[in-house]
Amino acid sequence: MLPYYGRISSAAVDPIEKKPLLHFRPGGRVFSIGFTGCNLVCPFCQNWTISQDPDAPSDYLSPADAVRAARDSGCGMIAYTYSEPLVHAEYVLDCMDRARAEGLANVLVTNGHAREEPAREILDRTDAANVDLKAWDPAWYRSELGGDLDTVKGFLGLAAERTRLEVTTLVIPGRNDGDEDMRGIAGFLAGLSPDIPLHLSAYRPMYKYRLPPTPRDTLERLAAVARERLRYVYLGNVPGAEDTRCPECGAVLVRREGYRTALENLVPSGPASSACGRCGASIPIVPPEGRAGGGA
Ligand code: SF4
């Protein structure tokens, strides 16, 4: 029995940057659907009204109707997001197959808690994913979030092989903001690929947590640590959006202002690849639809 199959709590058109995904079709819009319930219990959850209450208000939307709505929105992409999509894997798989058949890209935003077999099934149909890596301390993952660090690491390894992966760490003062925590996270991701973008997002008081918001200085300190191992590190949930720069010559590739995006020196070189227009370095950004270059 799947009593929550197709129960959709929210649907909206978002900028792809809001997922956050900065290296997948920058400037694109994505039709986004959310569910109810989650397999974690993060006490700082920003979407706790839907993630912690499986019976939150929702409407039934069949996979066919979800994909039709995505197609009619003109977005070219559909995201499974807001609360945790993996607890609705059967529905997500049904949508993903239909979406691909309609020429839509599948975007997954998840906490990465799935066993290997369903993870492979979903990731093989996923075009881009943002996965939370919430901390590097397995005891805190388990006691505070109800999660399992090794499961997330396994999911990230599969995702890095199968889809365009970006990773988000919500930085919480006094909980996961030590330099050693960040060395662990960045070192692990760099072992998968130093090109995986890492988003360091500022926490704000939410749900059960009343700690003060994350200072910008903390994010910048941790970003400096992460950049020792990773080529693309971004700050999130703070004023001002970050540009993407070429790691070789420093040229601005994608300029951002809020959710407004402009390609500057980014030259599409194929359906799923780009290059720096100034120095020619290969850049792991999937160009916007209709902007793919002629190379492979
Ligand atoms: S994994 Fe995400 S949706 Fe689930 S409780 Fe944690 S923050 Fe909320």
Image (cartoon, rainbow, N blue to C red):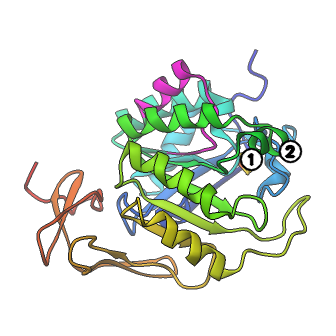
Which badge, 2 or 1, is on the more N-terminal residue? 1
Give yes or no for residue 119 being in the magenta stretch: yes
- Most foreground residue, 64 or 199: 199
Instruction: Please report the residue visible at 49 percent of the width from the left and 43 percent of the height from the top.
Output: 68
Query: Residue 273: x percent and y percent?
Result: 21, 55
Q: Are marks 2 and 1 in contact (CB under 8 Å)?
A: yes
Residue 216, quarter of picture: bottom right
Instruction: Please report the residue visible at 52 percent of the width from the left and 70 percent of the height from the top.
Output: 223
Considering the numbered disc 1 on the image, is that residue within a helix, a strand or a loop?
Answer: loop
Query: Residue 286: x percent and y percent?
Result: 29, 56
Which residue was labeled with disc 2?
56
Total labels: the figure holds: 2
Q: Which residues are magenta?
A: 108-125
Q: Can see residue 71?
A: no
Q: Give the Cα separation between the discs numbered 2 and 1.
A: 7 Å
Give yes or no for residue 272 being in the magenta stretch: no
Q: Which mark is residue 91?
A: none
Q: Is 197 positioned to the left or the right of 83 in the image?
A: left
Quadrant in which the N terminus appears: top right
Query: Residue 55: x percent and y percent?
Result: 87, 38
Which residue was labeled with disc 1?
9
Label 1, residues with CA under 10 Å away: few <14, some 14-19, many ≥20: many
16 above or below 55? Answer: below
